[in-house]
Image (spheres, grey):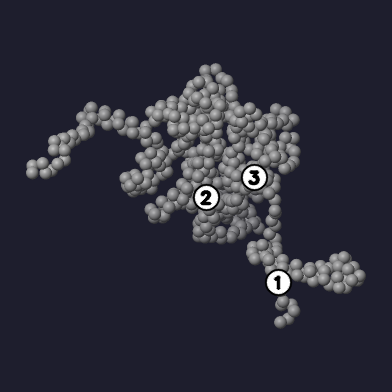
Amino acid sequence: MSRSRIKPMEGYKPLKFTAKDRSLLDKSPEEGLKRIKAKVQANVIMALAGSYTGASRSKRQFGSWQTSIGDADADINFDLPTLRERSRDLIRNNPLATGALHTKVGNVVGTGLSLKASVDADYLGMTPEQANEWNRNTEREYNLWAESPNCDIERTSNIYGLQDLAFRSVLENGDALALPLFVERPGVVYSSVIQLVEADRLVNRDWARDTDKLSGGVEKDDYGAPKNYHVLEQHPGAFMRSSKNWTWQIIPAFGADTGRRNVIHLYRKLRIGQTRGVPDLAPVISALKQLGDYTEAELTAALVAGLFTVFIKSENGDLPGGLTTDTSDSSRADQQSIKMGAGAIVGLGDNESIETANPGRPNAAFDPFVLAILRQIGVALELPFEVLVMHFQSSYSASRAALLQAWKFFRARRAWLADNFCQPIYEAWMWEAVALGRISAPGFMQDPAIRAAYLKASWIGDAQGQIDPLKEAQANALMEDRGWKTAEEVTAEMTGGDWEEKHKQRAKEHQMRVAADLEPKVTVLQVPADNNNGDTNSGN
């Protein structure tokens, strides 16, 4: 075998002899050879230790692959402003990005996540009747506050609109802040309000560089927990700023005396030590942008191919009698106005000609190629292809499988929103409700365990859509009959409602229909008493 065909061992690097090696060889050849032998053995061991071809540095296909070893903040924070700008631009102008965002928000939030109080009656020593009464009264008081725009500091949205906007902001920008504040207003029962802050305003004070204790506008304690949040008084991209001087508000993460949460920082934590969130479209920004440009180019080419234009060449540019151009100059189309149009007739002057290429549109390969890219985008966005493009043309089983897979994601994100936004806001409101005496909760202020027992709650959202409601209903009836599901679970999944409220309404409707002789009254058959006390042989 020729020497040129011999390739070095994978991961093996040629030895480099330093000046120290040469000096040792001159002084003591024996010691120098020992040093060289040790280096050769170490080099071979390192070459044999690497077992993953994906970590190879000698393969040609990996030669231009530039990677970093940064921590979560080092990999994220520097790129965040650009990622947010491009994410917002795609959502404004790219139909697929807009549709994906609306699909997620519409299914996760929908008409809003409603409170269902579930006080821990056993721990608090309540009877079931007392617990039901406490739950109903708490829900009534919460809805008094939550369903009014007064819960929003801007007085434009109720709590369900704030849920929509907060979740939408997290998807679009990566994260968002919600500040539970107190603003007294005449005629308003509760002073609790929620202020949403866009991610761009969370910036290190005075544009300081990140450190181990300050990263992305979040100041941390020795354990890495948030200590203070640095919030710009005005959006850095505001069109009209009242002052040229930037001012910050430093907001403590928790109350010094009560430990209450002062800032609700909404973002998905995907890495240990991650301080800021990443826009949902970040992994597919490049694919969406190029796919959008490709689609626009194909649309333009198809439009040009659909235009029928006649070019007539004459010596002086005049058209034959009865023909006119679509330009203001009927004698001749000047250099600035020659263009194609639907049924256009353009006159050309001497020594002028038109050369066109056949665009071959529509492109037969356009649809399969786009669908292949959309499948990859759907995987990154955790949306099945059918749900992403809102088109179900497969069988019932395939379509149902796609919806079920999508709803795994929707339920997970709904639980995340409930835990990180709805529940903390409910807890912040409860403090004021108890302090005002509108909610009776003895021990709430003093004992964290008692407070947690009062604050137990679940959040009910819109029900999952059904492809074949009859089949779904039959399956749920069977599972309820076998004890695999409760009536409350079935009601929540099928309609998103409250089974107890529906039961009360059904009983009321039944009584009204019985009174109107539209339904027979339900009677209970009375079994006659057995005088023989069950002794069938009494006649013997």
Which residue ends up furthest to the front in the rendered image? 540
Which residue is pictured at 59% across the width and 38% down the height?
266
Q: Of callouts 3 and 2, which one flags the residue occurring earlier in the amino acid sequence?
A: 3
Residue 308 versus residue 466: which sits nearer the camera? 466
Q: Quadrant of residue 241?
A: top right
Which residue is pictured at 8% across the width and 42% down the height?
539
Circle 2 or circle 1, nearest the eye: 1
Examine the rendered structure and indicate whether residue 152 appears above or below residue 319. Answer: above
Tell me which amino acid carries mark 1. Met
Q: Are marks 2 and 1 in contact (CB under 8 Å)?
A: no
Residue 435 on image: x %, y %: 54, 22
Q: CA distance from mark 2 to mark 1?
A: 41 Å
In the displayed structure, does residue 314 sit left or right of residue 536?
Answer: right
Disc marking residue 9: 1
Examine the rendered structure and indicate whether residue 62 appears above or below residue 98. Answer: below
Tell me which amino acid carries mark 3. Gln
Residue 331 on image: x %, y %: 60, 48
Residue 8 versus residue 320: which sits nearer the camera? 8
Which residue is pictured at 64% across the width and 45% down the height?
274
**Label 2: which residue?**
382
Dot 2, how many residues are within 10 Å of its Cα: few (below 14), some (14-19), or many (20+)? some
Q: Of callouts 3 and 1, which one flags the residue occurring earlier in the amino acid sequence?
A: 1
Task: Look at the numbered disc 1 and give the secondary structure of its residue.
Answer: loop
Q: CA distance from mark 3 to mark 1?
A: 39 Å
Disc marking residue 274: 3
Residue 310 on image: x %, y %: 55, 54
